[in-house]
């Protein structure tokens, strides 16, 4: 199970302001907080900084590494920004977020993965568009798998993102994702998964409840990576509780540790 | 007893069966189909829009209302010729080049269609040349461009500049939307309008066309 802390993202207003003001203190605190609450990786995304994304990425990576020795998830659609961020990563095996099978994007991103021996989030989409059915996702995942492993990326370093759509606009969005995970796992048992959660609940009230339940449901079928807010105690509680229920937590150790630390409620 | 108000209420409630029963009943009883469309079906969606905007109704409920309305429309189509179907105007929509996201764009299309606009959806990854082609092909009043990604937002700017350089008529209005898009951005790229969500898009089109007419 890998939890990627999602809070350092300039699409969030407070982070954007901090980056614009070069408020290192704010960023450091945000990184520390996510690390303390159980994130395994810290995501860094400054994609909204049009024109200055590359410089800001370097600044953010250095900033975070001054305060925690955490592996980072460098998040950008731009290979040059990915390369710049990954070049500075000092701790653990970094993660690249993300590649897809879209024309142009795959070929320009692959060399960056290989250069840094990074883990990679692979979006199950190609130039034909966003996937609808689980069969769409299997087809794209199969192509990505063959191309990535063919280039030397180990199975264990591939994290498929099935791309979640809102159940409010596509009723089958949830079960199609569950089906995709099951089928991909059956075909490529050693790969991992990674997904964001907020899409699933778009357009509905009480979104956090739906997000948490989807964690429990998807984990039961083999999902093993989430990009989420680790400071959300109820969410982390669901993650720890699900792991323990699924026997992914020896002697319920992490569940009890988190209980004593007050990480979830 | 079926009447126009009860049809509007049933559209609001998303009761597909009742809408189709009552539309049949009224049309068989001699009510003008155009009247049923305007004061029953579209009126129902007019009740939906403010409730959606205020957060009292949610996306799936709006979709259900739209389905109820469209079911009624399809029943009435055989009684009226295409050109007699009331339309507030023609809107071409599409997600710009390089961007494959369609949920928000589809929602805008649905809201416009159910409020009485004729909507032509060019789909996703729409090149600026295709927006241009759509003008001669469909003769729209409004062109709507959508982008979800900060990386493709720039294509909105490119497309608008391209259309303006090609000298498209002033009366064709260009509106834009999408998560990273703002009024500020719309002003910068000289779009005629911006709306932050699907329900405001209807009001935006209404006001743009009222001004133009």
Image (spheres, grey):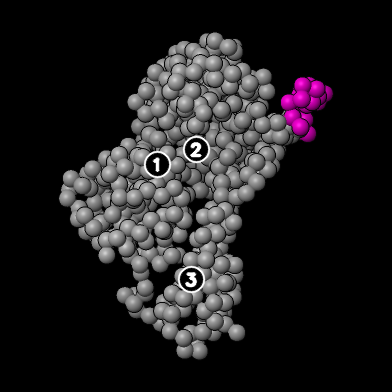
Residue A209 located left or right of residue B33 = right
Q: Is residue B168 visible in this depiction of the protein?
A: yes
Local secondary structure at mark 3: helix
- Do dots 1 and 3 share one subunit? yes
State the residue position of label 3: B43
Pointer 2 residue:
A124
Instruction: Find residue A51 and report its horizontal and vertical position in percent.
Output: 34, 26
Same chain shared by disc 2 and disc 1: no
The residues bearing labels 2 and 3 have C-alpha atoms spaced at a distance of 41 Å
Q: Chain of mark 1?
A: B
Which chain's residue wears label 3?
Answer: B
Extreme-front residue of the structure: B211
- Gap between marks 1 and 3, in whole Å? 30 Å
Residue at the spot x=29%, y=60% of the render?
B211
Per the rendered image, the range of residues in magenta is: A244-265
User: Is the residue under label 3 in contact with that under label 2 (CB below 8 Å)?
Assistant: no
Q: Is residue B20 visible?
A: no
Q: Is residue A227 magenta?
A: no
Quadrant location of the C terminus of chain B? bottom left
Q: Which mark is residue B182?
A: 1
């Amino acid at each position: 199970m890998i939890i990627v802390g999602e809070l350092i993202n300039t699409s969030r207003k407070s982070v954007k302001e901090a980056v614009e003001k070069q408020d290192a203190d704010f960023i450091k605190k945000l990184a520390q907080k996510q690390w303390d609450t159980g994130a395994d990786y810290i995501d860094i995304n400054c994609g909204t900084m049009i024109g200055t994304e590359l410089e800001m990425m370097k600044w953010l990576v250095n900033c975070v590494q001054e305060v925690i020795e955490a592996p980072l998830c460098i998040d950008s659609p731009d290979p040059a920004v990915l390369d710049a961020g990954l070049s500075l990563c000092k701790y653990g095996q970094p993660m690249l977020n993300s590649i897809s099978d879209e024309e142009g994007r795959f070929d320009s991103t692959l060399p960056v993965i290989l250069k840094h021996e990074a883990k990679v989030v692979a979006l199950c989409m190609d130039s034909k568009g966003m996937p609808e059915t689980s069969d769409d996702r299997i087809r794209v995942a199969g192509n990505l798998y063959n191309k990535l492993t063919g280039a030397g990326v180990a199975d264990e370093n591939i994290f498929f993102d099935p791309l979640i759509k809102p159940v409010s606009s596509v009723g089958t969005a949830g079960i199609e994702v569950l089906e995709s995970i099951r089928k991909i796992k059956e075909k490529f048992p050693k790969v991992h998964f990674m997904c964001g959660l907020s899409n699933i609940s778009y357009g509905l009230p009480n979104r956090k409840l739906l997000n948490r339940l989807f964690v429990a449901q998807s984990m039961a079928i083999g999902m093993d990576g989430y990009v989420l807010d680790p400071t959300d105690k109820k969410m982390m509680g669901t993650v720890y509780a699900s792991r323990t229920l699924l026997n992914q937590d020896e002697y319920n150790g992490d569940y009890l540790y988190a209980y004593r630390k007050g990480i979830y409620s | 007893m079926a009447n126009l108000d009860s049809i509007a209420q049933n559209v609001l409630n998303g009761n597909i069966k009742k809408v189709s029963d009552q539309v049949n009943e009224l049309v068989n009883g001699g009510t003008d189909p155009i009247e049923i469309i305007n004061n029953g079906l579209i009126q129902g969606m007019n009740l939906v829009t403010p409730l959606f905007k205020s957060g009292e109704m949610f996306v799936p409920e709006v979709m259900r209302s739209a389905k109820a309305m469209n079911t009624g429309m399809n029943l009435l189509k055989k009684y009226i010729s295409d050109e007699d179907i009331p339309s507030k105007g023609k809107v071409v929509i599409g997600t710009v080049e390089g961007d494959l996201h369609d949920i928000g764009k589809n929602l805008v299309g649905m809201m416009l269609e159910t409020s009485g606009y004729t909507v032509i959806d060019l789909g996703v990854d729409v090149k600026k040349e295709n927006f241009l082609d759509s003008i001669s092909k469909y003769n729209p009043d409004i062109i709507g461009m959508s982008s979800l990604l900060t990386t493709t937002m720039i294509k909105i700017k490119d497309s608008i500049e391209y259309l303006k350089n090609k000298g498209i008529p002033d009366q064709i209005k260009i509106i834009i939307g999408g998560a990273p898009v703002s009024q500020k951005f719309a002003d910068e790229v000289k779009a005629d309008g911006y709306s932050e969500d699907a329900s405001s898009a209807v009001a935006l089109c209404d006001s743009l066309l009222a001004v133009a007419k």
